[in-house]
Image (cartoon, grey):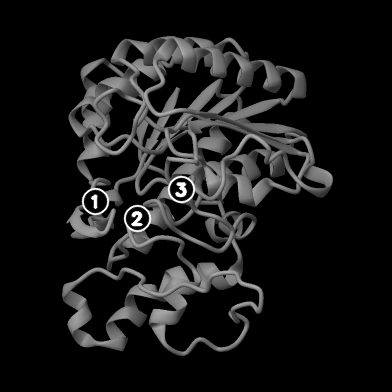
Amino acid sequence: MKIIHNPLHALHQGREEMFRGRMVACHEVPARQDFVLAALQQRGFGRLEAPHGQEIDIDAAIARVHDQGYIQFLAKAWDDWVAMDPANAQRDALPSVWPLPSRHGFRTDGALLNFAARLGRYSFDAGSPLMQGTWAATHMGATCAVNAARAVLAGERAACALTRPPGHHAGPDFFGGYCFLNNGAIAAQALRDGGHAKVAVLDIDYHHGNGTQTIFYDRPDVFTVSLHGDPATEYPFFLGHADETGTGLGQGYNLNLPLPRGTAFNTWRLALDQALSAITHYAPTALVVPFGLDTFKDDPISGFTLDSEDYTTIGQALAGLGLPTVFTFEGGYAVEAVGTNAVNLLEGFGAH
């Protein structure tokens, strides 16, 4: 398995985030990727490489998934934040106003000349700080995802985009949940564009992949499946229910398997078996796995109770599908355990 890691990820390093009504130190930190890299090297993974952009139009690949206005916003966001007030150079950008749906509607189609309005227009939470290095790190992360997809298209059994910030909460025109560009969706679209007629995305992060669902919700060519904490009690709250099955041509091609806080591995594994059965029935020719490790029992912001050894079993189950597979690194905030858990999953898959 090729492991394509983001050499610029540490440029995205938030100072604080809004979490449950108070400012706290960021949970999504550079050490998450660093621990995974260290664990890979300790266990003898020899195929670690930085991404390359030669002969790949990364911006075109991003635009296949994200709206152009949103991309332009992200690329300029830091400069616009500082232009609003030079003192902003000393603090991260966090939104404070949002256009919520209502009977009479909120307008977002006009010129939003104030950066605070644009920041709210393109975000869905106040917990995803944006800073000077966010675009560079995020853009390089998308490059990792495209490189991983191209490796699989070239004949690799599997490839992993080891990158942060994560991606599965980012939608076509919104960021949140620490995510700005949707690496898993970008990889899935690259697989489609590379010749795979049907692709499945199996999201095993604790939190529902609301961005991925939104991107593919009306499409039959990408089957999106997510195992996650029940949105009745768990972030991101407003998507991820079992009755969300797609719309239009995409009807029947979205499967949500919400589980209650406190779910142990035996129950979680039954849901995974249901997901794998549904994917087998769909009969894709490639798989994308946004793998979050915040299902771990000691994760500080999640609520499942998986042990480190369970990730080996998960990897083995995923390998049983027998599909060319792209992995994208998502959540996992028990930082010192994230490396062990990630490598257990990849080793279980048979990554060496």
Residue, disc 3: 236
Q: Is residue 248 above or below residue 277?
A: below
N-term mark: 2 or 1: 1
Q: Reply above or below: 193 against 294.
A: below
* Residue occupied by mark 1: 10
Residue 279: image x %, image y %?
Answer: 68, 22
Q: Amino acid at mark 1?
A: Ala
- Which of the 4 quarters of the picture holds residue 299? top left
State the SS at label 3: loop
Going by the numbered disc 3, the residue's amino acid type is: Pro
Indicate the secondary structure of the residue bearing disc 2: helix
Label 2 sits on residue: 137
Q: Nearer the viewer, residue 63 or 337?
A: 337
Residue depicted at 56% across the width and 51% down the height: 55
Element at label 1: helix
Label whose residue precedes the other's in the sequence (3 or 1): 1
Q: What residue do we see at 55% from left, 18% from top? A: 272
Real-space CA distance between mark 3 and mark 2, rounded to the nearest whole angstrom: 23 Å
Horizontal side of 260 relative to 308 (left or right) equals right
- Residue 253's x, y, as percent? 74, 36
The residue located at (32%, 34%) in the rendering is 332
The percent position of residue 219, horizontal first and vertical second, equals 76, 45
Q: Are marks 2 and 1 in contact (CB under 8 Å)?
A: yes
The spot of residue 12 in percent (x, y) is 27, 56
Q: Is residue 349 visible?
A: no
- Which badge, 3 or 2, is on the more N-terminal residue? 2
Between marks 2 and 1, how big is the CA–CA gap? 7 Å
Q: Amino acid at mark 2?
A: Ala
Q: Residues within 10 Å of mark 3 (few under 14, many from 20)?
A: many
Image-based side of 291 in relation to 28, left or right:
right
